[in-house]
Image: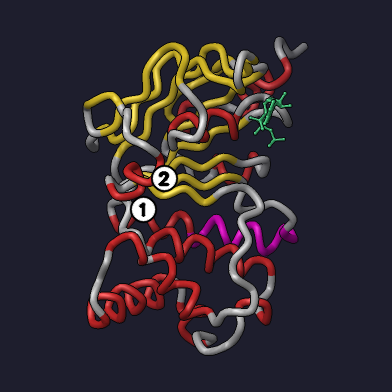
Amino acid sequence: MSDVLLEVSALRTGYGDLTVVRDVSLTVRSGEITVLLGRNGAGKTTTLRAITGLNRVTGGSVSYLGAPLADAPHKRVARGISYVQEGKKVFRELTIEQNLILGGFSRRLGKRGLASSVDEIYQLFPILGSKRALPAASMSGGQQQMLAIGQALMAKPKLLILDEPSQGLAPVIVKEVMERVHELKATGIGILLVEQAVQESVAIADEVAVIEMGRTTLAGAAADVSLEDLQRAYFGAVA
Ligand SMILES: Nc1ncnc2c1ncn2[C@@H]1O[C@H](COP(=O)(O)OP(=O)(O)OP(=O)(O)O)[C@@H](O)[C@H]1O
């Protein structure tokens, strides 16, 4: 089994005095995808915000590479945690290539290093290479989502966190985005994917976690999770 990158255990977090996540546990391993599912308002984004340091952990633990995470958010990026937030917008007036270069900013690369990193992204997402000189606004929603992911990959993450990359996309495009995310496994990074597209995301997952009202109601290997298990975790007991 691959190395554990991220271990969230009995996490408690929220906004100020308001606790919205009470008991969430999940694991992400290198070269694997963990999908975090749950209904609207279940606490998925809040969980991601605690992992990335945007919300305070008030109970439980978040460990990365075997040690508790305590760095400021920007230092977590430097340590290999990249986060593509929900509804993440790219810089629409800038070209695709300019958007990618901005994503590499935290690595302080020289011109050559930047160029070779950008080329790596073009190999992963050829559509971005073929449109490199065009403004990001000229691309479709699915392509802009791939650009947002490409931008995050420019920071050379070990752990890539994606919050609902399929949001607002047509079903056929959702499938394509999921295929591209699946292909990223081959690079060896671990991916934590929050999704509403249950079937499409579970199809590419190694691990699945479901949260309901701030608590994990199901966690385990995707291969062992049935549709009935998912329904039970989402909605309580099924008839
Ligand atoms: N800034 C905030 N201040 C106070 N409460 C918040 C804030 N952001 C979210 N919440 C509340 O926290 C709870 C969990 O929200 P969260 O965004 O984590 O859910 P989610 O599972 O990601 O849902 P969605 O799929 O709709 O994005 C909700 O009840 C929400 O209203």
Q: Position of residue 221 (x, y in %)?
A: 42, 29
Residue named by callout 2:
191
Q: Is residue 78 above or below residue 112?
A: above
Q: Secondary structure at mark 1?
A: helix
Horizontal arrangement in the rendering, residue 228 relative to residue 180 (left or right): right
- Tell me if label 2 and label 1 are in contact, CB under 8 Å: yes
Residue 152 percent coordinates (x, y): 43, 58
Label 1: how many residues lie within 10 Å, few (<14), some (14-19) or many (20+)? some
**Place of residue 94 in the rendered image (x, y in percent of width and height, measured from the top left):** 57, 79
Percent position (x, y) of residue 17? 62, 13
Of marks 2 and 1, the one in the foreground: 2
- State the image quarter where residue 192 is shown: top left
Q: Residue at x 40, y 40 (%)?
A: 73
Q: Is residue 171 magenta?
A: yes
Disc 1 marks a residue whose amino acid type is Lys
Q: Nearer the viewer, residue 126 or 99?
A: 99
Question: In the rendered structure, which amino acid carries the disc numbered 2?
Answer: Ile
Magenta: main secondary structure equals: helix
- Bounds of the magenta segment: 169-180
Query: Is 101 within the magenta?
Result: no
Residue located 61% across and 68% down the image = 144
